[in-house]
Amino acid sequence: GKTTLLEMINNKFSEIGAPGFQVVIWVTVSKDADVHKIQKSIGDRVGQSLSASSSQAEEQAEAIFTALSKRRFLLLLDDVWETLDLKDVGIPQPSAKNRSKIILTARSREVCRKMGTERLAKVKALNECESWKLFKKNVGAEVDLDSILINPHAKVVVKRCGGLPLAL
């Protein structure tokens, strides 16, 4: 779903010679968001050797801000669970002038709203047929999912996954 779309965007703009951005940065934020780990991930992509230590957070934010302010960047924040203050991380505000962009995935529209997103795109869960196709693809040809012994159990598993591609 959301992560897969973000991966596609990352791959598209990370290709050598791809027009658009000078640097593409992917950060998986996850439930226990840690500003210092996020800073380290960004620093690694922009050539700044930063530590994941909390004692230097403000200095690291300044270093990231300086590095990103000089470049047109695409920042991909995956799996954001809670509002993240991008200023604390050191991320400059994208504008028409710098033409940088930030794309984030979140489970909650409220998180997106609080972070000031300009556009929201809801990614719907897969329907039953799409879920089954993806499940079959992921399981592989080695397992006969049409077998009388396996099929009913496989269908239950697919249903419990709720149309979520990562679960399938």
Image: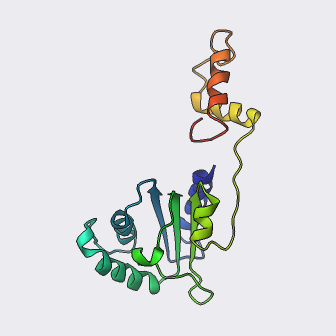
- Residue placed furthest toward the top: 149
Is 118 left or right of 48, judged from the image as shown? Answer: right
Along the viewing direction, whichever of 76 and 71 lies nearer the viewer: 76
Residue at position x 25%, y 66% in the image: 53
Say which of 58 and 25 sits in front: 58
Looking at the rendering, in which quadrant would you find the C terminus? top right
Residue 120, image x, y percentages: 69, 65
Report the side of 131 relative to 20 (left or right): right
The residue lying at 56 percent from left, 79 percent from top is 100
- In this picture the colour scheme is rainbow
> 89 or 51, which lies in front?
89
- Looking at the picture, does residue 148 appear above or below residue 26? above
Quadrant hosting residue 148: top right
In the rendered image of this protein, does residue 163 appear above or below residue 151? Answer: below
Q: Which residue is found at the position 63% from the left and 71% from the top?
A: 117
Q: 121 or 73, which is in the foreground?
A: 121
Q: Position of residue 8 (x, y in %)?
A: 60, 57
Picture layout, residue 64 above or below residue 164: below
**Residue 156: where, in percent of width, then height?**
65, 22
The residue at 59%/83% (across/down) is 99
Q: Is residue 19 left or right of residue 40?
A: right
- Quadrant of the rendered structure where residue 118 is? bottom right
The x, y position of residue 121, in whole percent, is: 70, 61
Instruction: Please tell me how many numbered marks the rendered image carries.
Output: 0
